[in-house]
Image (spheres, rainbow, N blue to C red):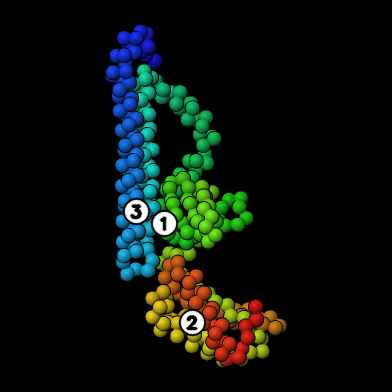
């Protein structure tokens, strides 16, 4: 390491040369970070604006992927810039970066055992992004290692290391990518709304099926509900049977993420139709 504080004049000379360069490097890194973040936010806002202003009711898979990719690329670029600036600053401080290769190798080997989880998170995040398993705005259910309950909600952020999900209660859940065991994407390409209708076991099954079919036909012709449906809701038949009740299942293919809205609306329509026929639902 070079000794640059041997005298006041030496210190002044160092401040005018290497010291000034260090300040410029740090300021440059800060400005680049702000600029990269600005570009990322502008790109993601543009994607969101196109989604809101278009006729599409859901984000396309390409838009989800571009949104997640913009966040990941920004994160990777900033990490590389910070590493390069850190090396340049060390050189200006008198450290021989080439001489740090051997100690760095030893330190890297030692840290490798403790940083296995971080490396695992980054590798898992890389495959999550490249394989397009999910993206920004997707509704997902994530099984996490060691957790009895899955993390379920809307994806708000995806990086190489973590996935951030907001559930229906407004809680933000952060999941390390390396601890993800299984991902259930509830909003990829299309979704399905399933409505189980409990009725008395003594009810006329044929008549119940006719009522549910009429509800499906009316729903598919409704100008407000029809855009959310990919086809007419259909009756699958008896799903469960007990001594007192039976469950008849009705399903509908919907746009991604719209299965919850469609399911709630179909339940309201089914309840009203059964009530008009004098058939009571059993909970």
Rendered image quadrant of residue 240: bottom right
Residue under pointer 2: 234
* Residue shown at the point (32%, 46%) measured from the top left: 38
Q: Are marks 1 and 3 in contact (CB under 8 Å)?
A: yes
Q: Are marks 1 and 2 in contact (CB under 8 Å)?
A: no
Taking 134 as reference, is 257 above or below it? below
In the rendered image, the quadrant that contains the C terminus is: bottom right
In the rendered image, residue 218, in percent from the top left (x then y), is placed at 45, 85
Taking 32 as reference, is 66 above or below it? below
In the rendered image, the quadrant that contains the N terminus is: top left
* Residue shown at the point (31%, 47%) measured from the top left: 39
Callout 2 crowding tier (Cα within 10 Å): few <14, some 14–19, many ≥20: some
Q: Secondary structure at mark 1?
A: loop
In the rendered image, residue 55, in percent from the top left (x then y), is placed at 32, 69
Mark 3 or mark 2: name the one nearer the start of the chain: 3
Taking 104 as reference, is 218 above or below it? below
Taking 99 as reference, is 226 above or below it? below
Is residue 196 among what the camera can see?
Answer: yes
| C-alpha distance separating marks 3 and 2 | 38 Å
Residue under pointer 1: 136
Mark 1 or mark 2: name the one nearer the start of the chain: 1
* Count of marks, rendered view: 3
Residue 44 bears which disc, if any? 3
């Amino acid at each position: 390491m070079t000794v640059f504080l041997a005298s006041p004049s030496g210190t002044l000379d160092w401040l005018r040369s290497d010291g000034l360069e260090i300040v410029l490097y740090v300021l440059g890194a800060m400005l680049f970070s702000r600029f990269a973040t600005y570009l990322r936010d502008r790109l993601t806002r543009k994607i969101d604006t196109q989604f809101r202003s278009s006729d599409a009711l859901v984000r396309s898979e390409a838009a989800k992927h571009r949104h997640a990719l913009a966040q990941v690329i920004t994160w990777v670029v900033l990490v590389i810039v910070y590493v390069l600036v850190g090396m340049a600053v060390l050189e200006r401080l008198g450290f021989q970066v080439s001489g740090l290769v051997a100690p760095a190798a030893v330190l890297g080997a030692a840290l490798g055992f403790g940083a296995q989880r971080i490396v695992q998170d980054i590798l898992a995040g890389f495959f999550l992004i490249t394989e397009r398993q999910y993206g920004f705005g997707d509704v997902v259910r994530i099984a996490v290692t060691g957790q009895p309950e899955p993390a379920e909600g809307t994806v708000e952020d995806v990086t190489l290391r973590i996935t951030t999900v907001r559930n229906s209660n407004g809680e933000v859940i952060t999941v390390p990518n390396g601890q993800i065991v299984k991902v259930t994407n509830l909003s990829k390409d299309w979704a399905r709304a399933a409505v189980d209708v409990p009725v008395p076991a003594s009810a006329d099954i044929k008549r119940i099926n006719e009522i549910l079919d009429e509800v499906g036909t009316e729903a598919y012709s409704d100008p407000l509900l029809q855009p959310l449906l990919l086809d007419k809701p259909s009756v699958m038949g008896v799903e469960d049977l007990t001594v007192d009740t039976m469950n008849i299942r009705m399903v509908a293919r919907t746009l991604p993420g719209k299965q919850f809205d469609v399911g709630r609306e179909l339940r309201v329509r089914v309840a009203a139709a059964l009530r008009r026929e004098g058939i009571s639902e059993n909970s």
